[in-house]
Image (cartoon, grey):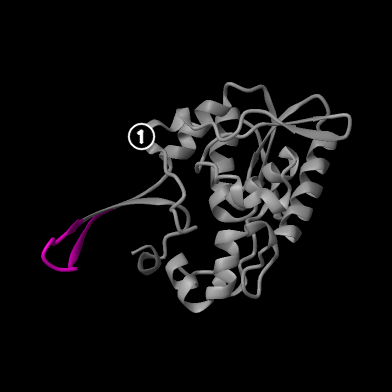
Amino acid sequence: IIRELKIEGGCNVQFALNPESSEYFLIEVNPRVSRSSALASKASGYPIARVYASDLKRAYQTGEVVARRLHLPIIADENLREIYAGQWEGLLFTEIAEQYPEDYHCWFTDIGHCRPTGGESTEELLERAEMVLEKIALENPDSVVAVATHATVIRAVQSQISGVGLAGMKDVPWVVNASVTELHYENGKFTLGKIGQAAHLQELRTDMPANV
């Protein structure tokens, strides 16, 4: 449905399914802006001085909603992008498992040492993420900033800062979409604050599927 309608970003889809067949009927499609709005409300509780975002549309749109609520400009940076998935781009995870079983098995069992087929390795992702986060921290001493990025970026950075590294990334859970994870930077070092705060989402909370 998403592909046929050429929807960019998130949306809510309502449909009716015939229990006696695989036939279904599309009832309604709405852009998913409610989670971003809930996140913006959460963000307004912080003394945020600047808003940064990945230049990829989904995270950028989330950052825009937050920036608009706080009356701040948004600063896009390509180094905050999600992992480049190469030949996996545009595929469902069920399709990836069928077409690239060995690489998918690595992703599912040892994500920290994985490279999507023809794409970017998790190690390469972590390297650029650490670089841009430190740059942002140094540009904003003694300030609170908001950064809208992606799930694999957050998971890799969390693994590194927590001390388990990429080897232990497989045991670090995904954070919830539009949740809040805090990083603190002091004396040239990052530490973790609260991780994956999602109470502000209430019924809008969506967890990662089990096969991701």
In front of the other: 29 or 133: 133
Element marked by disc 1: helix
**In the image, what residue type sits under mark 1?**
Glu
Q: Is residue 150 visible?
A: no
Quadrant location of the N terminus in the rendered image: bottom left
Residue that sits furthest to the bottom in the current view: 99
- Residue at image mark 1: 203
Q: Which residues are magenta?
A: 16-28
Q: Against 140, is 32 above or below?
A: below
Residue shown at the point (74%, 50%) measured from the top left: 129
Identify the image quadrant of residue 137: top right
Q: Is residue 121 visible?
A: yes
On screen, residue 156 versus residue 20, left or right, reads right
Question: Where in the figure is residue 119, as x and y percent of width and height?
Answer: 66, 70
Q: Against 118, is 71 above or below?
A: above
Q: Against 120, is 202 above or below?
A: above
Question: Where in the figure is residue 34, as x and y percent of width and height?
Answer: 41, 38
Question: Where in the figure is residue 192, as x and y percent of width and height?
Answer: 70, 32
**Mark 1 packing: few (<14 Cα in 10 Å), some, or many (20+)?**
few
Residue that sits furthest to the right in the current view: 187
Identify the image quadrant of residue 111: bottom right
Residue shown at the point (69%, 61%) measured from the top left: 113
Residue shown at the point (67%, 57%) measured from the top left: 112
Residue that sits furthest to the left in the current view: 20
